[in-house]
Each structure stands twice: as structure tokens, then as C-alpha cells.
Image (cartoon, grey):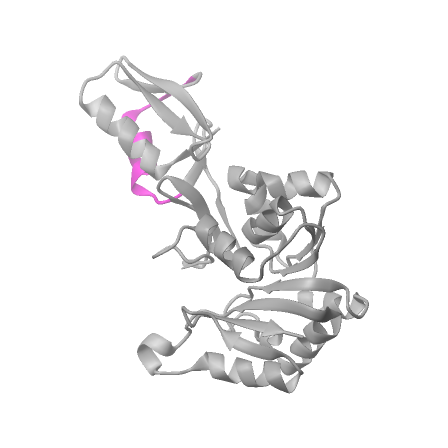
């Protein structure tokens, strides 16, 4: 069972109000359970916690496993990885303090659905999803009844996804053989696919400083090769450098894509490129 900082605050408020109990959400709102207050303790399931323990959870924007003591879903392995909750919706993945999803104007799930709709993923299509993350775009493609190959280089990211209730359809799709998850380097595995293998590509790489090879002309030529005639690709970029340095990073990407043969157009928010073959 999982508890996040938002729900911990609500539990703590009810305790401090002198109530006997509260019905709280767990597993990032997938389940509900009564939390009891007895003898100065906060009781979740069979575990009695000191209020100070719940206070620490409430102050930390993270997700915890309900154990004694609670265990945070975060760890350090060259980088710091954390499942970060967002109130009333799916969490995001945070690496070294950087959120891997847009969360300011869209929820992570809304963001994934928007990307899927922009490239009009349809039933029976073969979709290549580059950089799985928590699996939200792969899951949305799977729900459209497409066949999905998704690539994630970082095993730590896959481990975080395994804890996330909102990622469970990723693993369900794998069990049903409708999603194939490759724990590999996309810049290398792309060369193993046959020509014209996919009708849709979703390319959502980390920022350039972390994965410059996924923005290279060499990689884009491989994307063009494996995309079918009439196929389309959504390349999410964001606006790196635009706010503080006035850089138009996206223009250089457009040039490299058109040099490889793609026809391109920017999305309305100017954060992605739609590319066609």
C-alpha cells in the first residue's frame, strides 16, 4: 500500500482536529481505507505510527510504501530518482530534481493523451515509443489497441514504474504481448529494426544535455528509415533555453529532420514537432 504527501496532510489534519478516524486514499487514489486514531497513534492497516512519522511524510513531496518505518519510493544511483505525486492525478518521475512530465498546465495523463491524439494513433497500428518513462504514452497507445514497442535505457526508471499504480497497464500490455518493452539504448536498438516497421513514432527524449545522441541527424535518419511511407512522428522537445537565453532550439531540430526527408510542422504550443514521411 502506498501513501503520498497530500494524503498524509489530510490524515494529520484529521488527527489534530481530535477525530476518531478518517477514510483516506491510498495507492495514489486507487484504494481507500479507514485510518484510526488511538492512544496518540495514527493507525494505518495493522501499523501504528507516531504522528511525527506522518508529519515527515506530509512535508516530503514523495510517495511512500506503508511499512514500519515507511519507505520512500526514491533512490540514488548516479542520479536521484523519485516518484513524485501530483494531487488528484497520476504522479511524475523526477530525476535529479527535474520532472519528466509537463505538470504546469497539463497533468501527466492529459499530456500523454494529447500526444497520442496529435499523431492519431489508431487500432492495429505499429507504434514505436522512444523513452518509456512511466509508460503513459505507451499505455495510451495500447488502449487505442495499437501494437507498441517501447524503449527505455534506464533500468532505474522501469523499477520506479513498477511501483506506480498508473503504470500497471504497461505491464498488463506486456503480459498480453501487445506491448514490448526493450531495456536498451534507443540510439543502438533503432538500427536493428527493419525498414518501414512503424506507422507512428512517439519520440520524447530527455533534454539534450542528457541524451544528445537522440537529437542527432544520424538518429533522425534511422527514424526516417523505420517509419512507413505516410507515417507520422511526434517529437516532443519543450522549450529548453527559450525562457532565459532566447534560444530557438527547436529550429535546429526542424532543419535536421527536413534534411533527413521529413515534412515537418510545429504543434500549436511550439513545444513539439510533427514530422511526416
Number of numbered discs present?
0
Location of residue 219 in the rendering, given as x and y in whole percent from the top left corner: 67, 76
Location of residue 277 in the rendering, given as x and y in whole percent from the top left corner: 67, 75
The answer to whether 5 is drawn above or below residue 225 in the figure is above
The answer to whether 3 is drawn above or below residue 135 in the figure is above
Picture quadrant where residue 39 is located: top left
* Relative side of 226 to 108, left or right: right
Residue 134 appears in the figure: no
Which residue is painted at 59% across and 46% down in the image? 159
Location of residue 142 in the rendering, given as x and y in whole percent from the top left corner: 64, 47
Which residue is painted at 74% across and 69% down in the image? 226
On whether residue 49 falls in the magenta region, the answer is yes
* Relative side of 232 to 108, left or right: right
Q: Nearer the viewer, residue 16 or 206?
A: 206
Location of residue 158 in the rendering, given as x and y in whole percent from the top left corner: 61, 49
Which residue is painted at 37% across and 17% down in the image? 34
Picture quadrant where residue 45 is located: top left
The boundaries of the magenta stretch are: 47-62
Q: Nearer the viewer, residue 16 or 48?
A: 16
The answer to whether 31 is drawn above or below residue 119 in the figure is above
On whether residue 180 falls in the magenta region, the answer is no
Q: Nearer the viewer, residue 29 or 61?
A: 29
Residue 103 appears in the figure: yes
Picture quadrant where residue 101 is located: bottom left
Amino acid at each position: 500500500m502506498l501513501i503520498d504527501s497530500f494524503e498524509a496532510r489530510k490524515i494529520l489534519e484529521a488527527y489534530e482536529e481530535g477525530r476518531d478516524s478518517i477514510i483516506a486514499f491510498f495507492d495514489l487514489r486507487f484504494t481507500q481505507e479507514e485510518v484510526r486514531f488511538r492512544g496518540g497513534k495514527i493507525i494505518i492497516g495493522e501499523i501504528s505510527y507516531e504522528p511525527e512519522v506522518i508529519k515527515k511524510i506530509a512535508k516530503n513531496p514523495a510517495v511512500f510504501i506503508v511499512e514500519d518505518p515507511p519507505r520512500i519510493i526514491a533512490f540514488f544511483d548516479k542520479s536521484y530518482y523519485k516518484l513524485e505525486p501530483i494531487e488528484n492525478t497520476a504522479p511524475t518521475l523526477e530525476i535529479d530534481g527535474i520532472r519528466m512530465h509537463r505538470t504546469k498546465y497539463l497533468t501527466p495523463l492529459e499530456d500523454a493523451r494529447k500526444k497520442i491524439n496529435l499523431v492519431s494513433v489508431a487500432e492495429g497500428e505499429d507504434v514505436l515509443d522512444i523513452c518509456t518513462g512511466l509508460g503513459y504514452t505507451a499505455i495510451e497507445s495500447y488502449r487505442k489497441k495499437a501494437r507498441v514497442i517501447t524503449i527505455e535505457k534506464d533500468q532505474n526508471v522501469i523499477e520506479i514504474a513498477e511501483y506506480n499504480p498508473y503504470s500497471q497497464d504497461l505491464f498488463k500490455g506486456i503480459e498480453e504481448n501487445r506491448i514490448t518493452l526493450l531495456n536498451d539504448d534507443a540510439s543502438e536498438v533503432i538500427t536493428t529494426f527493419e525498414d518501414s516497421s512503424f506507422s507512428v513514432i512517439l519520440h520524447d527524449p530527455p533534454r539534450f544535455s542528457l541524451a544528445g545522441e537522440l537529437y542527432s541527424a544520424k538518429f533522425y535518419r534511422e527514424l526516417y528509415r523505420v517509419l512507413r511511407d505516410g507515417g507520422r512522428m511526434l517529437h516532443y522537445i519543450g522549450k529548453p533555453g527559450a525562457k532565459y537565453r532566447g534560444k530557438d532550439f527547436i529550429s535546429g531540430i526542424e532543419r535536421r529532420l527536413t534534411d533527413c526527408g521529413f515534412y515537418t510542422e510545429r504543434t500549436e504550443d511550439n513545444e513539439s514537432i510533427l514530422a511526416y514521411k
